[in-house]
Each structure stands twice: as structure tokens, then as C-alpha cells.
Image (tube, rainbow, N blue to C red):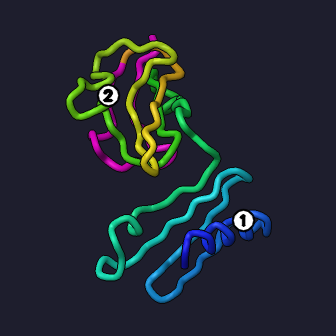
Amino acid sequence: MDLKEIQNLIKFVAKSGASEVKLEMDDIKITIRTGSESDTTIVQQIPMQAAPMAQQMPVQVAAPAAETPATPAVASEDSKYITIKSPIIGTFYRKPSPDKPVFVEVGTEIKEGDVLCVIEAMKLFNEIESEVSGKIVKVLVDDSSPVEFDQPLFLVDPS
């Protein structure tokens, strides 16, 4: 199945109104889930011996998200900390490049608009900016780790 056929399948599923479609053919397994009109996810799983490296990675097709700010959410009702979550799936990086210092450390004072990290998604490096001011209390993800949509990245003390 080539990229054009996958794109046509995504469009068909989006128009049909189905919330999830699974397709299995030989060594390819595709699941398409639609959570909203602009959010469609495809997961393609191929056995190691049958596929090149690039095809084993999950693929997300969504509205363009270059430099989408992180979504803050309260960690719990009793907690005074705010959890900053990943707005996209990809690979989490604490530094702009391997030879540069990290964007933020535990104890760093941040303000709205400060870059906290970058998330690489489909060869694009998306700067994740803070939507809150405060102090970084905890970094919840290791550098160079894969992250999912809505996964907690940082705990921030807003006081």
C-alpha cells in the first residue's frame, strides 16, 4: 500500500464519520482513529524483517502544528502544580541541538512564551512554548524519548 492509497483511505474514513477503522493486509496493519474533524491518526506496524526502519514508526496526520504551544492543565484538584503536556506526538528534546545547553532545568523561572523543549515530528522540530509563568518543578520525560499527544512533560509551580 503506497502513500497515495493511505491518504485516500484517510479521506474516506474522515468523510464516513466512522470513529475507528482497522485494516490488515499481509505484513501491514493500519488503524485509523478520528477524534475530531481535524485529528486523524494512522498507526502502521510492520514486522522487523519485512520493512525498512522508516516504515516502523507511528505516523500522525493532523492539521499543521508547527510551533503549537503546549497545553497546560491542572495536574489534580489538590495539587498546586500545573502540568504542561505535549501538543503532538514525536521525539522530545531538551536542547535545541546536541552541543547547546538545555532550554529549562528544575528550578528555572519561566514566563509565558518561553521555549521549554522541542518535539521532532516527521522531520520537523516544533518549539514547545509555555502558556504559563512559574518555576519548573519537575521534568517528566527523558531527553530523546518518544512522547504521545497529551503526555505530561513538565510540572510548573505557578506561584
Quarter holding the N terminus is bottom right
In the rendered image, residue 24 lying in the magenta stretch gets the answer no
Give the spatial CA distance, label 1 vs label 2. Answer: 40 Å
The one nearer the camera, 84 or 23, is: 23
Query: What is the x, y in percent for residue 86?
Result: 47, 39
Q: Residue 19 location, x and y as percent?
A: 70, 65
Q: Which sits earlier in the primary sequence, circle 1 or circle 2?
A: 1
Query: In this rendering, would 83 be left or right of 50?
Result: right
Q: Quadrant of the C terminus?
A: top left
Asked if one can make out residue 73 in the rendered structure from this viewpoint, the answer is: no
Please tell me which residue is depicted at 62% across the width and 64% down the height of the picture: 33
Q: Write the start and end of the magenta stretch as one range.
A: 136-159
Mark 2 closeness class: few <14, some 14–19, many ≥20 residues within 10 Å: some
**Which residue is the site of mark 1?**
11
Query: Which x, y percent locates residue 113?
Result: 50, 18
Instruction: Name the side, left or right, on which 144 lies relative to 113.
Output: left
Query: Identity of the amino acid at label 1?
Result: Lys
**Which residue occupies 55% across, 75% down?**
2
Determine the residue positioned at 34% across, 72% down.
52
Q: Nearer the viewer, residue 76 or 26?
A: 26
Q: Residue at x 58, y 56 (%)?
A: 61
Q: Which mark is residue 138?
A: 2
